Image (tube, grey):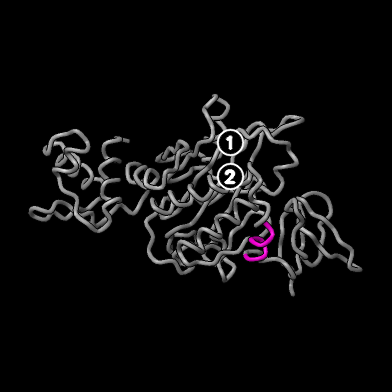
Amino acid sequence: MPALDSSILLAFLEAGDQPVSGDRLAKELGISRVAVWSRLERLRAAGFTFKASTRKGYTLTAVPRELNAAWLDAQLRLRKVSPEVELLAEVDSTNSEAERRLAAGHEAPFAVLARTQSAGRGRLGRRWHSSPAGNLYLSLAFRPFIPPENLKPFTIWMGLAVCAHVEAAYDVKLGLKWPNDLLSADGRKVAGMLTEARLDADAVRELVFGLGLNVSTKAKDFPSELRALAASLELAGASPLDINRVAAEVLAALFTAWEQFIDGTWMPTFRARWQRYDVLTGRSVRVGLRGEPVAGIVDGIDDEGSLILRTGGGRKTIVSSGEVTLRNE
C-alpha cells in the first residue's frame, strides 16, 4: 500500500467538504504537481472520484465500496489507531493468519483484515460465511501474559464494546446473545465472535479475537439457508456505510476495549452494559456443549461472564461455556 496514497486521502479526510488544492498537496507531501495529478489518477482507477474546481482544488466525492488499503489506512491515521493493521485480499481465516504471525514472532498487538475468507471459522468448528460483499472480517492479536481465569469475561466485554459503538455511531441497537453472537432487533445474526488462546499453566501467552461483522450485505447476497437468520448493519437500519470507515472505527473501539480490559477500567461499566444489550435474561433456554444439556431460565451473568440459569425448583446453575438455544416460551 503506497503510503503516499494514504497521505493524500488523509488530507481529504481532514478537509471534510472543503476542496484541497494541488499546490497544498504538493507542498505538504514534498512532490510535484504532476506527481499529485498522477496519484489522483491512480486513485480514480481504484474507485475514488474527485471533482476539480478552478482555483480551488479537488473535492473527494466518492470512495470504493470495498475495503481499500490506502483509504483504510487514512481512516486509521485520522483516528490515531496505533497498532499495526494489515488488509489482505483473501485468507483462509483471519484468526488462523493472526495465529501464524504470532507463532512467527510478529510483534503484538496487531490486526489482520481480509476482504474475503476461504475457510472462515465460527465457534465449535462451524464455517463462517465469508463472501466479499459488504462484510468485515478481522482478528486482533495480543500477548497478554495474564492468568487464564482473568480471561473469562473477555469475549463478552469485546462484544459489548461493539454493541455500544454501533449504537452510538450508526444508530442501530444490537443485542448480545451469550456468549458470542450479536443480533439485530428482530433476532437475526449480524456478527459473531471467536476468541482463541494459547495457555500455559500460569498465563495466557497468545490471544486472538476474531470478529465477523455484516456491514452492508443485502439479503440476496446471503446463501438462501441464511437469509432468514442473518442481517447486516444496513439491513438493521443503518444508513449506507463506508466499510473502510466502519473498519477503522470498529478497530479503534476494540483496541480501546482491550486497553480497558487489561487495566481493569472495564469493570465498573460491565454489568450496566450487559443489562443494556443482553437478549437472554428472562428467556427459557437450553445450554449444551459437553455432556447433558442444561435447561432453565436465564438470570443474567456473574462477574466472570458466566451465564446464570434458574433450573428446576429455582436452583441456580452457573454455566461457563456452551451453545444456547431458545426453548418454546
Quick one: label 1 or label 2, which is nearer the N terminus? 1
User: x, y (%) of residue 30?
Assistant: 19, 33
In the displayed structure image, the side of residue 182 where residue 314 appears, left or right: right
**Contact between labelled residues 2 and 1, with CB atoms less than 8 Å apart:** yes
Q: Quadrant of the N terminus?
A: top left
* Residue located 63% across and 52% down the image: 157
Which residue occupies the foreground of this view, 23 or 155?
Answer: 23
Secondary structure, mark 2, is helix
Q: Amino acid at mark 2?
A: Trp
In the displayed structure image, the side of residue 299 where residue 236 appears, left or right: left
Q: Residue furthest left?
A: 54
User: x, y (%) of residue 314?
Assistant: 89, 68
Tell whether position 131 is magenta: no
Query: Which dot marks residue 258?
Result: 2
Q: Residue furthest right?
A: 313
Which residue occupies the foreground of this view, 265 or 7?
Answer: 265
Res. 241 image quadrant: bottom left
Residue at the disc numbered 1: 142
Res. 69 image quadrant: top left
Number of marks in picture = 2
Q: Amino acid at mark 1?
A: Phe
Judged by its main secondary structure, the magenta piece is helix
Instruction: Give the extent of the magenta segment.
Output: 270-276
